[in-house]
Amino acid sequence: MNATDLKTIPFNRTHISVNELDYLGEAVRRRSTCGDGPFTRRAAEILEKITGAGQALLTTSCTHALEMSAILLDLQADDEVIMPSFTFMSTANAYALRGAVPVFVDCRPDTLNLDERLIEAAITDRTRAVVVVHYAGIACAMEEIAELCDRHGLTLIEDNAHGLGGSYRGRPLGSFGSMAAQSFHETKNVQCGEGGALLLNDAGLVARAEVIREKGSDRSRFFRGQVDKYRWVDIGSSYLLSDVLASQLTSQLESFHDIQSRRHAVWYRYHEGLADWAIENGVSRPAIPDGCAHPAHLYYLLLPDLENRQAFIGHLRREGVQATFHYQPLHTAPAGARFGRVAPGGCPVAERVADRLVRLPLFADLDETGVARVIDAVQSYEVS
C-alpha cells in the first residue's frame, strides 16, 4: 500500500498473496467448487505443519469450528463451559446453542487473557470444559491451565482466532487443547474473506468430527471407499469450506512467512515508536510474557479512561487514521446475562479494559510511510 495516496489509513486492508488470483481462477476452472477438493487438502496440510495439529478440518468460519467442538463434547442442558468474558460472542454462542452455560471468568490485566488464577474457583460439578482465547495472539498460561484441566477431568479447547503463528514456550498455539478453532476472516493475518478450521489433537475425535462437518453423514468415508453408500449417522451441519475459498487460503498460507514478516515489522515499529509517548501519557502497551512468541495479530493501546479513549479515536480519525475499540465483556451483554453466569468475583478487569482499549491499523501492506503517519497521529494526542 502506498500510504501517501490514501486520505485515511484504514484499520485493515486485505493482503493479496503471490498466487492468489491464479489459484482462484484454477479453482473455478475445475468446475467442481464444493468443499474437500484439492485446495482444501493442500490448505489443511500447510495448516497442520504450522500448528503441529494432528488434523485440520477446514470450516466455513471459526464460529462453526467452535460449534463443532461443542457437538463433540456431547454437552447436556446446564453443563458449564468456562471461558473469558473478554472475547467475541462466538466463543459463548457455540456452547449456549447446545444448552450449556457459559461461565465468564475475568482476564489478566497484563495480557488480557483468561486469568488462570481464577479458573479453579469457577469449577463446579457441571463443568465440562475450559475454553481459552489467546488475545492478540499472546498465549495464555497454557501449562498451568492444561494441568488444571487434567486434574479436574476437563476438556481444554483453544479459541485460536488470533493466534496462528504464535507459540508458548516453543510450542505452537493450537496444539495444546484437544481441539482448537482457527479463523480466516478478512481481519486475520491469513484470510479468505470468511473461513475457519477445527484443529484436532485428539485422534479419537477425528472420525466423528468428519461426520459432523458433513451434515451428520459418513460421506467422507464413502468417498474414501470405506463404505458403499453414505447415510445420516449423527447430528451435524454443513460446515465445509468451498474449495474456491480454500484456493485463496492455500495461497495465503503459502505466503505465511512473508505475511508474518511484514506484520511484525509494523508491530515492532509501533512498539518502539510509541514507548516514550505511552509513558508520558499513562498509556499501556501490549505485554509479552517470557516464553510467548506472538504473531503480530493486532496492536492495542490502553488509554487511562473511557473519555480519553473516545477522544483519542476521534483525534486519530481527524488525523486520517482509522482506529477502533474491541470487545465488550460478554457478561454485560443481554445474551450473556440470559444464557451465562459470572464466576465468583466478577470480571472487573474486563470491564475496565473494554472502556480503555484502542486498536491501531495493522496489516501486511502497511508501508513505512503509513506507519509513520499513524505514529505521528498518536504522538500528537495528549491525555487529559
Image: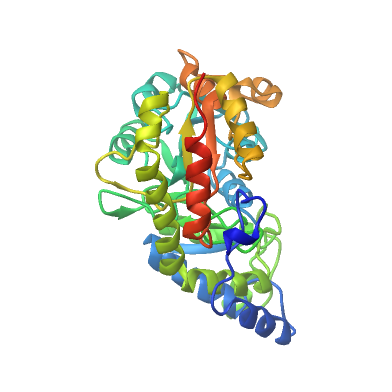
Residue located 61% across and 51% down the image = 9
- Say which residue appears at 29% left-offset and 36% top-offset: 147
Residue 49 x %, y %: 39, 68
Task: Determine whether 187 is above or below 37 in the image.
Answer: above
Lateral position of residue 77 relative to residue 57, left or right: right
Q: Nearer the viewer, residue 353 or 210?
A: 353
| Relative height, residue 19 to residue 260 (above, below) | below
Q: Residue furthest top?
A: 345
332 in relation to 76, above or below: above
Where residue 30 sits in the image (x, y, percent)? 70, 86
Residue 195 pos. (x, y %): 62, 59
Residue pictured at 55% horizontal, 26% vertical: 354
Say how many tags the image has.
0
> Which residue is at the front of the view, 221 or 165?
165
Give the position of the N terminus as an image quadrant.
bottom right
Where in the figure is residue 338, as x and y percent of width and height?
69, 21
Figure check: 106 above or below 140: above
Residue 103 appears in view: no
The residue positioned farthest toward the right in the image shown: 31
Residue 135 visible, this orientation: yes
Looking at the picture, the colour scheme in use is rainbow
Lateral position of residue 265 relative to residue 183, left or right? left
**Which of these two is toward me, 219 or 361?**
361
